[in-house]
Amino acid sequence: MNIKQIVGVVVFLLLVFIAVPWAIASSGRWDFYYTLTSVALLSIASAGVWLTFYIGRINIGQGAYALAGGYVSAVLIMQVGMNFWFTIPLAGIFCALLSVLIGVPILRLRGVYFAMVTLVLTEVMRLAALALPITNGAKGITSIPLPQELSLFGLTLIPDFSTLENPKLAFYFAAVSIMVICYAVLWRIVNSRLGHLCRSLQQNEELSASIGVHTAYLRVLAYSISSFFGGIAGAMFVAISQSIYPSSFQVADSINFMLNCFLGGLGYVFGPMLGTLVLYFGWDLLFTTGRYQLLIYSSLLIALILLLPNGILSIFSRKEKRS
Amino acid sequence: MEQILANGLYLGAQYALIALGLTLIFSLMNVLNFAHGQMYVFGGFVTYTVVAQLGLPFVVGLFVSAMTLAVMGAFIEKFLFRPVIKKSTREESTMLLAAGIAFFLDAVILLIFGEKQRGVPKIIDGVLNWDFRIIMPYDRILIGCLAVAMIIAFILFMQYSKTGRAMRALAQDRVAAQLMGVEVDRYSMIGFALGAMLAGLVGGLLVTITGVNLGMGGPTSIKAFLMIMIGGAGVISGAIAGGFILGMMESIGLTALSSYGDITYLVIFATLMVFLAIRPQGLMGKPWG
């Protein structure tokens, strides 16, 4: 890490933890908290998708894991009575294990075949959530309580959300903190030995296998980390919306996770975060245009792809090349 | 039993026609066309407008729908896909574009045609009743036969016409085809237009039976993906086989599994995943598409 990167991280942290709440408080647009919290959570799931892109697979199945994670968290809270904060890692681990089971056969596929199978996986998960008894079918699980207090040796680490006067702000901080941790982990993975090996998979799987890289193990590992991200994003989402239905995450969401990565740029760790912000926030801002919302949104999307087919962040790399 | 098979064949003929367009576009340009379902819905609405609102005969509606979609496909290829494919570093970027086009078509359909379910009056009345073993309305039989005829016409076109040969060469090896003097850009455009036209034709055919509505696009795309996965992406015979297999599975599943609730598609998906784990390239596909 050089000085420039440290400064960038500090500026980013100041921005999300101090500048954004201050701007919202002074402008009075409290509804932005919900939008920004969603952006933070969706960008966690997108980070997972990005990691599968990093090993050269197109993943359109993140919605499945987000849904599974959400249900794990909801069932644990409602039926076991577990504290919400413990269900987050459990949801992530459950998704990671599930993804190992699913990933071992399907990760042999490549290209569009893998993309289509994962797309179908989202639909499978939705139908399974409809059919399984524990998920309560189409009615979903509703009126899930707000996150409880988390304390260590009597010391309150996270207060009970229902006693707070502004749970929206608390959710924002929680979601952004998790996002920061996830992206830090992602950045660390990409810049480690594991990341280099993943990059070799992206470029040529046969070649990297021939020089002794354990490709089958690596791609399952990357896929399970990706699903872990999806699971915790889904679990956190359940806490905010206090409900989950089979239609909470569907094919459209899975496609959006993929689009976030493309839009931000596949070659940049922070691409999915920016892509999510642009796509989700842009959609929200266009709400005032009423019935032309989708038309304007999709036209802008197409124009953006035509101008910058390698993602928004590719603007910067182009400048560097010229100078 | 005969009834189930007849239903399966009828569904399969339609499905195969949808899958053909998708697989054609995929084999020529390596583009997974997310907007295929939306194109199909658009074709249905065009037919509805021509037949039900302008009062013209059904054949005209079908023709107008096919032509509209063909022109639309040609423009989409020329002005959207071609520049993006040339400029992007990773081929998958076209997926983002295809999804953008799917959103765009959804918006256009919503603004022009509205969100209501639309259908046209039956082309012919009456029901075929063969000893209560097969009961099927005549218009379904007609649509099924039309779909089969179109599939045959498409195969003949791809086999024997010069354009068809050029497109098959392109699908096999892009560079080699270019070296042999095939105009790659021109035939890519024709291929995309043809694929879109097939989507428009199916939309026009199905609007007489099931009607169309705005929400049908996405699920149709997913079904089409399923079919080309079963048969193998980019292979014409595979798309046809996939369409008929899915139609048959749906027809049998709806009858055999009806006592267990709405789990037909869950079973189909699960079977498909097991199948793909054993044979990743589908029935007839090339490995690694």
Image (tube, coloured by chain):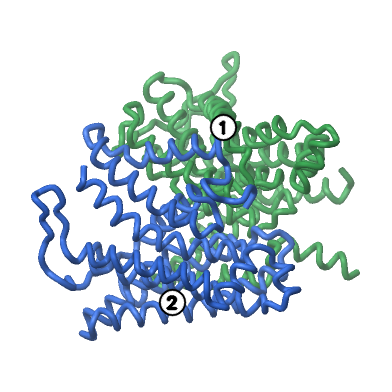
At horizontal 52% and vertical 69% (from top left) the residue drawn is: B159
Quadrant holding the C terminus of chain A: bottom right
Q: Position of residue A200 (x, y in %)?
A: 80, 43
Which of the two discs, 1 and 2, sits closer to the camera?
2
Q: Residue at x 27, y 66 (%)?
A: B143
Q: Which of the 4 image quarters holds residue A106?
A: top right
Task: Name the quarter where the N terminus of chain A is drawn.
Answer: top right
**Number of dots carrying numbers:** 2
Residue A49 visible in the current orientation: yes
Chain holding disc 1:
A
Colour of chain A, in one word, is green
Say which chain is blue: B
Vertical comparison of A2 with B173: above or below: above
Instruction: Look at the picture and state if B260 lies above or below B22.
Output: above
Residue A252: percent from left, percent from top:
46, 53
- Residue A92 in percent (x, y) is at 56, 30
Q: Which residue is mark 2?
A: B69
The residue under label 1 is A99
Nearer the observer, B121 or A290: B121
Q: Quadrant of residue B53?
A: bottom left
Which chain letter matches label 2? Answer: B
Residue A144 is left or right of residue A2, and the answer is left
